[in-house]
Amino acid sequence: MPIDISAKFAFHLDQPTDLLLQFEAAVIPEQKVLSSNTVLSPALHTARVPAQDAVGERIWVRAEGDYNVDYTAKVEINRLVPDLASLHQLDPHDLPGEAVEYVFDSRYCQADRMHSFVMDRFGDLEGGKKILAMCDWIADNFTYEAGSSNATTTALDTFVERRGICRNYAHVMICFARASTIPARYVSCYAPGVNPPDFHAVAEVFLNDPTTPGGGAWYIVDPTGMARADQTAKIGIGRDAADVSFLTTFGLSKFKSSEVNVSESA
Amino acid sequence: MPIDISAKFAFHLDQPTDLLLQFEAAVIPEQKVLSSNTVLSPALHTARVPAQDAVGERIWVRAEGDYNVDYTAKVEINRLVPDLASLHQLDPHDLPGEAVEYVFDSRYCQADRMHSFVMDRFGDLEGGKKILAMCDWIADNFTYEAGSSNATTTALDTFVERRGICRNYAHVMICFARASTIPARYVSCYAPGVNPPDFHAVAEVFLNDPTTPGGGAWYIVDPTGMARADQTAKIGIGRDAADVSFLTTFGLSKFKSSEVNVSESA
Amino acid sequence: MPIDISAKFAFHLDQPTDLLLQFEAAVIPEQKVLSSNTVLSPALHTARVPAQDAVGERIWVRAEGDYNVDYTAKVEINRLVPDLASLHQLDPHDLPGEAVEYVFDSRYCQADRMHSFVMDRFGDLEGGKKILAMCDWIADNFTYEAGSSNATTTALDTFVERRGICRNYAHVMICFARASTIPARYVSCYAPGVNPPDFHAVAEVFLNDPTTPGGGAWYIVDPTGMARADQTAKIGIGRDAADVSFLTTFGLSKFKSSEVNVSESA
Amino acid sequence: MPIDISAKFAFHLDQPTDLLLQFEAAVIPEQKVLSSNTVLSPALHTARVPAQDAVGERIWVRAEGDYNVDYTAKVEINRLVPDLASLHQLDPHDLPGEAVEYVFDSRYCQADRMHSFVMDRFGDLEGGKKILAMCDWIADNFTYEAGSSNATTTALDTFVERRGICRNYAHVMICFARASTIPARYVSCYAPGVNPPDFHAVAEVFLNDPTTPGGGAWYIVDPTGMARADQTAKIGIGRDAADVSFLTTFGLSKFKSSEVNVSESA
């Protein structure tokens, strides 16, 4: 069943400023964009470029004054969603080149600091079973609390403070996976069931399905428990939230409002 | 004039462990590897994969017990080294896709925290002149001091403590550039003149030479002042040191020794 | 000329909760409280205890529901305000016992991390001249910006980000002084000229006036430049803001509003 | 049974430098110093001052060149060591003035960041039972590992990394207690059983024994499990390790060696 997406946001730029936008459901094999409509305010310059690892597009904008984004789409998700518990992890030396960078530390995910904890808590598990245990641990120990984090909050901060939003949950999940040498990346997305409705973020881990050929694939895991992998429309991916914001301003902007709605298509 | 490189290092693995090695001069257009010899200890598994952005190779190893790396090479550097002061910076929306990720924050380079400082100190400069001013500022304000940093030291720590080694100098340089929306990346390398002789690290910034066609290129800048761009043999690049270590161990290892010598060829 | 103080604040407690209040001008030799009136909401328990180093009083409260504080006072400041440039610093071994703890690091003031910077920038100055140079440096390099910091912002964060409010300015000043082995403490206070009107914070440094007997005294320094030492009514002191908040809640509270006005008496 | 203490340490000062030493068993009611001998190198200046809260003495020294400390003592511990499980915690508003500062955050103990964890994990316990559960949790989750921390390691770092030495264990214990509004302080001490033999550190918490009059007292708790409260000779106390080092140098020093031995008296 397709999902219907509607996202609007608005901001103001006091002077001509460069922006990077990434808010549209990506056109990738695992999801089909049945229809979409993007309305952007007039700008001094607008250009589309492929986003990280060719998942989705970034839009460069140079604009001034009030700027509005209005996006609607209907997306059909065709992603295979195996039982994570059945998936294996690859030995590091069997990882394909494109997965390797996702075992390294990044801005918000300092996995090197969490080796001891992860070994101690999850060391006797492997692959998808380990990921599920990590996911459960986060769900059991963290409180979802709007306003409890900010743009500088790292996975370490969240691990200590035990509170956060989807972004923070995903960062801790990524750290735990990387600390076990399971590649993990950050996915910005739309999903029904996110409460309050907003842009959402989940983690993706690189595991191997022993029943299919090939050297592994990316599988969604959402430690907040709000999004279902078979209903999640990906916007883009990155090493963490630093790479894939719906709005990055290279200069000052005044954010005015945003409204996101995602639902199963009637 | 070519440079002669010799690098040896040794470590011990108590049990079968996966490693990632990246220590060889990269085979890339700007430098010609005239000869090279790599001798690795016997291992359970060894495989080469392309490294980040196809600059150089990583070697996956699974090994146990004592492990030694012995590498020698003669490399001719053909890099164009224009006067940085003559180079311009590109508007963000003119950056090619492959440069975009290098304006984002990374593990050790939290450029978002340095916007105010960079605007205040370097805001009236542009392009290569700005990079040179940043480089001078670092050289003037920092003390090169072995042992003053460790694996968790970020660019923020170094900015506060005013001490560090090549890695830390490069991280601060990268932060400053990114805070000005100039893409910047980390380069591990060999260079004569590094004192004490060791693996070296410099920064690279993405600027545009108005006298040549094309949309910009990467230019080396070394805030330690020890390496010359026309004598620097690149090993690999990354968003920061997290991406491009000569030895990454996925498990425990005991480092035993290393010895690096780089000189202008006789 | 006396100053008139008016401070009101209100908050709500969902359940019986312990609080610590410290908002009244301290009764100490250097300032005379000509008149004052404190009106507190009814509480389950209220008790006054001496505050840190016997400067002012803390009020323990156990209360539930809406709670309001309404305070007015007229205070005459009799503090001696010598030219800081004429004051000397004491050798560490000449510091009196009560000043020693104020050279040590505290929650928000990690002076140990700033030794290199302070030596490099201010190393050729001494005593009050050094303090004045530090104060000027902060004023020149920082931007006063409401909302730019939060409860976890340390002096290191502020030093990097170059923005903050009075609390952050005072923390950096304290770090700089301590890094020079000049004892420094945090003063919460009322002062006319604070803009926007609010509770204020300044630093105090322990220096010696060579023209008077005795082993040194505390002198106010305000790197924000908003408060004059001869018009500052002290509330309390501490090692940093962790010690001397106008409201510390041991449990959850919902802050509703505050309003502070301070003026020269008509 | 008394304990025998022997402590020696040596360092070098390139130029005349001020130092603060605190290494002698404190003369306080709960422990009797039966005999002691302190031999210090000749110095330019030496003076004793009371240490924090009058527990023990600090020695100011101004010296140059090689400096040696040689200390031996026999100390009888008369401390009452009740079952912690029988002790109650005081309501914040019943805390005596001198205990209040020990609920506030300090350099290495940012208890404010740990409220959620402490509430979630220990929220259903009270007083001494809560302290014992915290102590057990630390012992179960941390690994004692020399070299795993340094002078900048905070309780947050240790909480994340799950490794440390006595100092780090004590810092986390102090955070946990303060996050529950139980005053907690840092105690540097000598104790037999510390392995490897060295200066030791434990935490002290302020609790109330319902069977005795008075408003509470300090009780030792050692999350490393190495020291027994009835065999621990206190040197000094502080808000954390920043306040009570055996050697604080106000300038540069080269540490040469130290040797500590503590045993039950024959």
Image (cartoon, coloured by chain):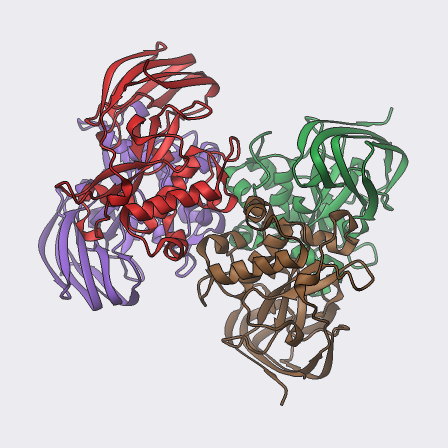
Chain colours: A green, B brown, C red, D purple
Residue B40: x and y in percent read: 64, 80
Instruction: Pick whichever, D2 or A3, lies toward us.
Output: A3
Residue A154: x and y in percent read: 57, 44
Q: Residue at x 41, y 59 (%)?
A: D145
Residue C5: x and y in percent read: 34, 17
Count of numbered circles on the image: 0
Instruction: Pick whichever, D66 or D85, lies toward us.
Output: D66
Q: Residue at x 37, y 19 (%)?
A: C262
Residue D172: x and y in percent read: 39, 44
Q: Is residue A5 left or right of residue A170?
A: right
Q: Residue at x 67, y 83 (%)?
A: B2
Q: Residue furthest right?
A: A34
Q: Is residue D129 visible?
A: no
Instruction: Pick whichever, A13 or D176, lies toward us.
Output: A13
Say which quadrant the C terminus of chain A sits in: top right
Instruction: Pick whichever, A216 or D159, lies toward us.
Output: D159
Is B52 drawn above or below residue C36 in the view shown? below
Is D148 drawn above or below residue B189 in the view shown? above
Is C21 drawn above or below residue B118 in the view shown? above
Res A92 quadrant in image: bottom right
Q: Is residue A117 visible?
A: yes
Is C102 drawn above or below residue C165 in the view shown? below
Res B264 quadrant in image: bottom right
Say which quadrant the N terminus of chain A sits in: top right
Q: Residue furthest bottom?
A: B266
Q: Is residue D215 left or right of residue C248?
A: left
Q: Is residue C117 left or right of residue D258?
A: right
Q: Residue at x 46, y 57 (%)?
A: B162
